[in-house]
């Protein structure tokens, strides 16, 4: 696919990394030659220096025959205009723009081909808010991914001593919970993937990915770790778009405190959110945290725009007695350093954004994509189409499908029904199939598996 | 330094290079000249050596850093040049020592076209074909070829590509992916070669000569299968065909790419470098015609043909000849040698310092004058309508100074070795500019030089082909410090 990415910032850069590795022709446009040079040294792509919304720059980048334009510069307006230019001048089929400001996002009639021709609007802040919200709803989970409109969830959990299943083989799961169906999609032990079979023994500290219907998640998590009580009290550090959005989403069900350093901003948030206690002060001020009963807090979430400030305040909060800490971290290198010690969960805005974008880049009918483990693994919801003759999956039992290495089918959603995968289940047309890929290298093969032979059309 | 990865790549490359011995073997069977054994031996040596390097490191993986890129490129060129010398040494060329074989092989791959062989007409067809083929492979660049066919060089391929591309601007890619760019270049290169071979054939060359000469024409090499070079054919038609194709091959290949893709010639005439390239050659041709007619060397029409042919041949650094131009009034051969310092356009197969660099130097010179007149004005150097970054302008000065310094060092070494000044000057110029024929003792061929001089000149050719800095970094202690 020929893809033009505008903006070589955090999102643009990560996206380029994950797309250039696959079979795509990437052209990256930015005004900063240094950033481009660094990426060009590292990846096989073309770079162009200039303003992404200018038609001549887009033409130079090959917009005339590009399949997709992804506008992720740091200006909403540039992104929107770039999509307009791509639509009006070059007729680009797919146009994706990052829009940050909630004021644009609120308008439902704004983004369509008659007005602003943006096919997919991504708003990283909103995605992060949703992501953190899901984590809070599922205490103990490292990552929660929705499939089939939330019917089905893929959850990553760390196994701890005290979990009933820890030290036992996977096949005992069934005898523990006869009425609940779940499937372990993959296990990561000390960073390495293990393909789970019935005989695999779960050890403490394993990172286990399992798939189950959404309402069963909590019971299964109890098998892997001592079940945590639902969260009640939450403290958020940072009142930017993410912090504010999060407080708004949580304030009805939870007891929320929000810390904001800037007095004016704090006032504005206070006007906006009436069920949240808005505090004016520095999140790394020990006295303030103690005064606000940090030791009573179930979760401390640091979402300012400085990685370092987030990390330090979360470590402090943990030391002062907060039960769980979640931290927004932009730099992938920091994530490896931290997760699992004082920081319980590191949330990466890039990986949530990249996931959404990948959904539109994958060939075949793909409803959801989630990148995992910093882009190394991937979970995918693909829709099977065709008949037994035109498709490589329809009409075949799961055990018969020739899956690439490291790939498992976790579950199938047929209409409203969730079917956990067994090797004798036969896939029908229009089934949503949830796959888990331990190694992203095989994405192309999976895509091909779900493509329908041309004779179908 | 990723030593293991580098050795692994080198092994693969040697194995691929062994395939270069196959066409000469076929030629040898075709003509029954008995030269096949040398090539078969070389094929086996190259393959086995490649396997020895590759097999123990079959599963080594790693990414090349910028620094490794330089080493890989130099090793590619160095090792392949030596490997390329093997069949020449084993072949049946009379009085051919190791230094002769190495010189010939370097001269071939760097598209210099200087030869140490006299009596080409009596050599076996397989060896003649092999020499032409070496130039053809070196013309577009071994690395570019490797990047085009080896997907594993995709990541890190840009470093290699940059180290080999001629010209001051190294980051321009024709397509988003490096392999695509390399392939596009080779398609154009291959297409031009076929067109050239067909034209020669229709103009009366034998098929063997047509193919052989098309290789060295499009590569801007200058090797011929005859001692008298293109002059052997004694045909104005062939001379003019040759001039046209040398002219085309001396143009930036990305212009050809754009022209083919848009099916229009506008890309050429919007390009300042191309216009300057053409103007220089036309100016020199006019001067040459004037001088030749004035001294009554030829009649007018012959003077025009000879002037066009030799100016294009020397100016683009090809080095074909149809007449002994060194016997012309001394002004002309020296002028032509100076023109060869300018050479072809950036991104072409030509040698020299490249038109764009000279253009930038010239523009910078005029800018200094303008600055004296308007001390407070800000002047940008523009080429084809866009401002050139100051960094590139600076690097051109660095390149120019280093080029000249190296030129003098090589020239002094040759003079210390006992050669007269004309010979030393012209031999070094001809080798560094990847031109080929020189003046004085090296006017016909380089066989009269001592072994030391041949090695020094081989190095000079490599310096010229890799544009100095790629090779010079190896001599910097910083490079070896981890």
Image (tube, coloured by chain):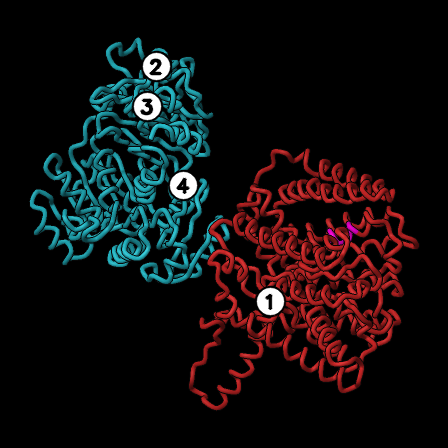
Q: Which residue is mark 2?
A: A422
Asked if labels 1 and 3 touch by Cβ distance under 8 angstroms, the answer is no
Q: Which residue is mark 1?
A: B345
Q: Which residue is mark 3?
A: A210
Question: What whole-number distance in Å separates the C-alpha atoms at marks 3 and 1?
Answer: 60 Å
Local crowd size for mark 1, using a 10 Å CA cut-off: few (<14), some (14–19), many (≥20): many
Shown colour of chain B: red
Question: Residue B192: image x %, image y %?
Answer: 62, 56
Asked if labels 4 and 3 touch by Cβ distance under 8 angstroms, the answer is no
Query: Dot 1 falls on which chain?
Result: B
Query: Dot 3 falls on which chain?
Result: A
Residue at the image point whose x is 37% and y is 27% from the top:
A436
Question: What whole-number distance in Å separates the C-alpha atoms at marks 2 and 4?
Answer: 38 Å
Q: Is residue B114 left or right of residue A93?
A: right
Question: What whole-number distance in Å separates the C-alpha atoms at marks 3 and 2?
Answer: 14 Å
Q: Is residue B44 left or right of residue A454?
A: right
Taking depth in this image into account, of B422 and B68 the one nearest to the observer is B422
Q: Mark 2, mark 4: which one is toward the viewer?
A: 2
- In this view, the residue farthest toward the right is B95
Asked if labels 2 and 3 touch by Cβ distance under 8 angstroms, the answer is no
Q: Which residue is mark 4?
A: A337
Identify the main secondary structure in magenta: helix
Local crowd size for mark 2, using a 10 Å CA cut-off: few (<14), some (14–19), many (≥20): some
Q: Is residue A44 left or right of residue B93?
A: left
Say which chain is cyan: A
Q: Residue B59's image quarter? A: top right
Residue B383 to residue A127: above or below: below
Q: Mark 1, mark 4: which one is toward the viewer?
A: 1
Taking depth in this image into account, of B56 and A121 the one nearest to the observer is A121
């Amino acid at each position: 696919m020929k893809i033009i990415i505008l903006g070589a910032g955090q999102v643009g850069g990560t996206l380029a990394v994950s797309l250039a590795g696959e079979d795509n022709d990437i052209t990256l446009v930015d005004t900063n030659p240094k950033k481009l040079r660094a990426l060009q040294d590292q990846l096989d792509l073309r770079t162009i220096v200039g303003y992404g919304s200018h038609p001549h720059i887009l033409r130079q980048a090959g917009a005339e025959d590009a399949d997709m334009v992804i506008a992720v510069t740091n200006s909403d307006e540039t992104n929107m205009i770039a999509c307009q230019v791509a639509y009006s001048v070059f007729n680009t089929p797919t146009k994706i723009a990052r829009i940050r400001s909630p004021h644009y996002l609120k308008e439902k009639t704004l983004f369509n081909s008659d007005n602003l021709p943006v096919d997919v609007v991504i708003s990283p802040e909103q995605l992060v808010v949703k992501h953190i919200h899901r984590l809070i709803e599922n205490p103990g989970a490292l990552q929660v991914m929705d499939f089939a409109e939330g019917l089905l969830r893929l959850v990553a959990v760390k196994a701890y001593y005290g979990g009933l299943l820890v030290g036992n083989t996977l096949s005992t799961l069934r005898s523990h919970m006869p009425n609940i169906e779940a499937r372990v999609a993959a296990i990561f032990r000390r960073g390495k993937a293990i393909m789970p079979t019935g005989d695999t023994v779960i050890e403490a500290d394993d990172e286990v990915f399992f798939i189950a219907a959404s309402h069963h998640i909590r019971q299964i998590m109890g098998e892997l770790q001592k079940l945590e009580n639902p969260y009640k009290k939450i403290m958020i550090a940072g009142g930017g778009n993410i912090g504010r959005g999060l407080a708004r989403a949580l304030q009805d069900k939870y007891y929320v405190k929000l810390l904001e350093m800037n007095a004016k901003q704090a006032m504005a948030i206070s006007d906006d959110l009436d069920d949240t206690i808005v505090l004016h002060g520095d999140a790394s001020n020990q006295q303030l945290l103690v005064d606000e009963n940090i030791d009573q807090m179930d979760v401390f979430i640091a979402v300012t725009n400085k990685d370092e400030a987030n990390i330090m305040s979360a470590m402090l909060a943990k030391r002062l007695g907060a039960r769980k800490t979640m931290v927004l971290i932009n730099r992938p290198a920091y994530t490896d350093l931290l997760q699992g010690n004082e920081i319980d969960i590191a949330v990466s805005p890039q990986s949530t954004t990249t996931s959404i974008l990948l959904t539109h880049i994958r060939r075949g009918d793909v409803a959801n994509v989630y990148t995992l483990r910093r882009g190394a693994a991937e979970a995918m919801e693909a829709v099977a189409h065709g008949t037994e003759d035109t498709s490589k999956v329809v009409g075949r039992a799961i055990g018969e499908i020739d899956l690439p290495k490291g790939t498992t089918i976790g579950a199938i959603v047929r209409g409203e029904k969730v079917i956990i995968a067994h090797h004798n289940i036969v896939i029908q047309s229009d089934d949503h199939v949830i796959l888990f890929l331990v190694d992203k290298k095989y994405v192309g093969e999976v895509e091909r598996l779900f493509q329908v032979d041309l004779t179908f059309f | 330094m990723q030593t293991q990865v580098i050795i692994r790549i080198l092994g693969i490359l040697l194995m691929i290079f062994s395939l270069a011995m196959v066409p000469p073997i076929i030629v040898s069977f075709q003509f029954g000249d008995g030269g096949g054994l040398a090539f078969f031996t070389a094929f086996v040596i190259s393959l086995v050596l490649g396997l020895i390097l590759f097999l123990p490191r079959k599963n080594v993986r790693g990414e090349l850093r910028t620094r490794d890129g330089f080493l890989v490129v130099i090793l590619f060129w160095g090792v392949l040049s030596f490997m390329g010398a093997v069949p020449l040494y084993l072949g049946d060329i009379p009085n051919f020592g190791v230094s002769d074989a190495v010189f010939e092989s370097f001269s071939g791959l760097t598209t210099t076209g200087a030869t140490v062989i006299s009596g080409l007409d009596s050599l076996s067809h397989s060896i003649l074909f092999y020499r032409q083929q070496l130039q053809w492979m070196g013309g577009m660049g071994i690395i570019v070829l490797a990047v085009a066919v080896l997907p594993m060089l995709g990541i890190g391929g840009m470093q290699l590509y940059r180290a080999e591309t001629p010209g001051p601007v190294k980051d321009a890619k024709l397509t988003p992916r490096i392999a695509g760019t390399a392939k596009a270049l080779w398609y154009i290169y291959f297409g031009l070669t076929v067109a050239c071979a067909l034209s020669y054939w229709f103009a009366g060359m034998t098929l063997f000569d047509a193919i052989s000469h098309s290789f060295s024409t499009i590569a801007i090499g200058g090797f011929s299968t005859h001692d008298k070079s293109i002059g052997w054919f004694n045909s104005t038609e062939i001379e003019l065909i040759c001039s046209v194709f040398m002219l085309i091959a001396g143009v930036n290949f990305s212009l050809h790419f754009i022209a083919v893709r848009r099916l229009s010639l506008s890309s050429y005439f919007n390009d300042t470098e191309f216009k300057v390239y053409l103007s220089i050659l036309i100016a020199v041709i006019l001067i040459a015609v004037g001088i030749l007619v004035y001294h009554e060397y030829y009649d007018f029409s012959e003077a025009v043909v000879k002037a066009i042919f030799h100016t294009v041949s020397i100016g683009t650094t090809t080095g074909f000849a149809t007449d002994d131009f060194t016997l012309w009034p001394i002004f002309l051969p020296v002028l032509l040698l100076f023109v060869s310092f300018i050479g072809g356009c950036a991104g072409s197969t030509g040698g020299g310092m490249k038109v764009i660099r000279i253009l930038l130097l010239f523009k910078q010179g005029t800018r200094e004058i303008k600055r004296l007149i308007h001390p407070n004005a800000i002047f940008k150097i523009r080429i084809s309508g866009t401002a050139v970054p100051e960094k590139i302008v600076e690097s051109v000065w660095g390149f120019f100074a280093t080029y000249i310094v190296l030129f003098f060092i090589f020239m002094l070494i040759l003079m210390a070795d006992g050669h007269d000044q004309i010979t030393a000057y012209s031999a070094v110029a001809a080798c560094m500019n990847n031109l080929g024929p020189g003046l004085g003792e090296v006017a016909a061929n380089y066989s009269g030089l001592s072994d030391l001089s041949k090695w020094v000149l081989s190095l000079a050719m490599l310096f010229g082909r890799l544009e100095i800095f790629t090779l010079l970094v190896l001599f910097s202690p910083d490079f070896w410090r981890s």
